Image (tube, rainbow, N blue to C red):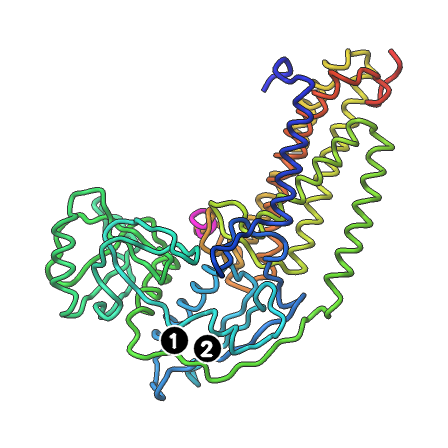
Amino acid sequence: MTVKKINKSTFFIVVVLIALFTFSAVAGFDYYYGDNAKTVVKGVDDIRLGIDIKGGVDVTFAPADDYDANEQQLAAATAVIKTRLSSLGITDNEVYSDEKSDRIIVRFPWQAGETDFDPEASVKELGEMAELTFRKGTDSEEDENGNIVPTGELVLVGEDIAQADYGQQPNDNGDLQWVVSLKLNDSGKQKFASATGELAGTSTPISIWMDNTMISAPTVNSTITDGNAIISGSFDSDSAKRLSDQINSGALPFKMVTSSFKTISPTMGEGSLDAILLAAAISFALIAVYMIVLYKVPGFVADIALCGQIAGSIAAVTGWFGFMHGSTLTIPGIAGIILAVGMGVDANIITGERIKEELRSGKPLDSAIRVAYKRAFSAILDGNVTNVLIAIILMGAFGVPSSFFSKILNSTIFRMFGATAEGVVYSFGFTLLAGVICNFIFGVFASRLMVTSLSKMIKNRKLYGGDEK
């Protein structure tokens, strides 16, 4: 948008949009259909707080009927639980498997708004062992509870799969590539032959679902009649193993049951969140006053932009944006928001100082603002891009849920930096990344629109850091 297209009303339009966005991100929007409450937009009350803030549950799963599971089967069951947690947006979790005692230990935080702290009820949130289905196409729809469920015609279920494995085989060019191989039971051979015969050569894939989460959607190249299929694609050893584990989990010959559960107290204490929020509110008030005193009109605009940036970070955590899941908010996650706000303040200070310099050099007000934002952008971009890369590496190295970023973050280059660990590190990277992106939206582009618009109404150069000229 050029300066000529920015008029006096632009400021008020941007302020109203930021105010509406902030209100919706903080308050959310719910309505009742009969006795059932339906959440359209999640607010701060719907944020799941991490174990360090609110506490949680420690649950141990074991095979039912004293079944002796092997290492591969336990790994598959662990993969299913991790998939469940990710699909629920529970990024602050710990999942361990104990092969000697055939146990899987899971720690995760309480639900948002939960006050009874009933561990048995929390365990039910994870549900039964995940259901594996193969379906024609990738169609899905929203059910009466607001959950996205697959609607494609059913091809196979978990019990039709004898085994999934992963390995390397040569591609058309003779290079080795990682693939996932499937071996079907007799119950699945004919069904799979019929489906592949129908879809071979078309663009319609056979999608693979873990409950309501699609984990793969390979296309069909030819009819498969012998019950042995190969799934190829952009796999490496880790992603191929993960997909085979997920498929095997739906075909386990045993059921996992809860052998024990207990509550976990907040690791940082009950009052930690209140103390952090109070400190953040006081700090923001002091920063807001400082920006207005030092930079006048650009400082006032910076305060509005910072409100939008904070709202954007909250919206990312709650899952306000439809293309990505939310995240569990931990204390490191709050630190990520605060760090991003600090970067937003820094961006506005750089711009404010640039405006001062351009005005003192004798440029007209409109020209000074335009040149200042143009020259400040490169410095702001350099600092923010560095933090974006750090945030992505943290998220890729320490566990990524199914989301808009999953394909990028699950790539080999990011997994090189570490193995799956506690979700508190992911929480920090997630909120930092969201805050940096919001800084560009509100602290750079929205601020420029507002300052340029105000310059059409307020002509006093002194209010922008210049002289009386």
Which image quadrant is residue 180 in?
bottom left
Which residues fall within the magenta stretch? 406-410
Residue 435, above or below 446:
below
Identify residue for label 2.
104
Where residue 271 sits in the image (x, y, percent)? 75, 66
Q: Main secondary structure of the magenta part?
A: helix
Where residue 32 sits in the image (x, y, percent)? 51, 55
Q: Secondary structure at mark 2?
A: strand
Which is nearer the eye, 33 or 275? 33
Mark 1 vs mark 2, CA separation in Å: 8 Å
Q: Secondary structure at mark 1?
A: helix
Q: Quadrant of the C terminus?
A: top right
Mark 1 vs 2, N-terminal side: 1
Which is nearer the eye, 99 or 343? 343
Q: Is residue 407 magenta?
A: yes
* Numbered mark located on residue 121 in the image: none
| For residue 342, side relative to residue 190 (left or right) | right
Which amino acid, by three-letter code, is at mark 1?
Leu
Which residue is painted at 55% across and 69% down in the image? Answer: 108
Decide: few, some or many residues near mark 1? Use Cα within 10 Å; few <14, some 14-19, many ≥20: many
Q: Is residue 343 magenta?
A: no
| For residue 436, side relative to residue 467 (left or right) | left
Where residue 396 sits in the image (x, y, percent)? 51, 53
Where residue 249 sits in the image (x, y, percent)? 33, 69
Which residue is painted at 59% across and 57% down in the image? Answer: 46
Contact? badges 1 and 2 (CB < 8 Å) = yes
Q: Quadrant of the N terminus?
A: top right
Identify residue for label 1.
74
Which amino acid, by three-letter code, is at mark 2?
Ile
| For residue 278, side relative to residue 153 (left or right) | right
**Residue farthest bottom in this picture:** 66
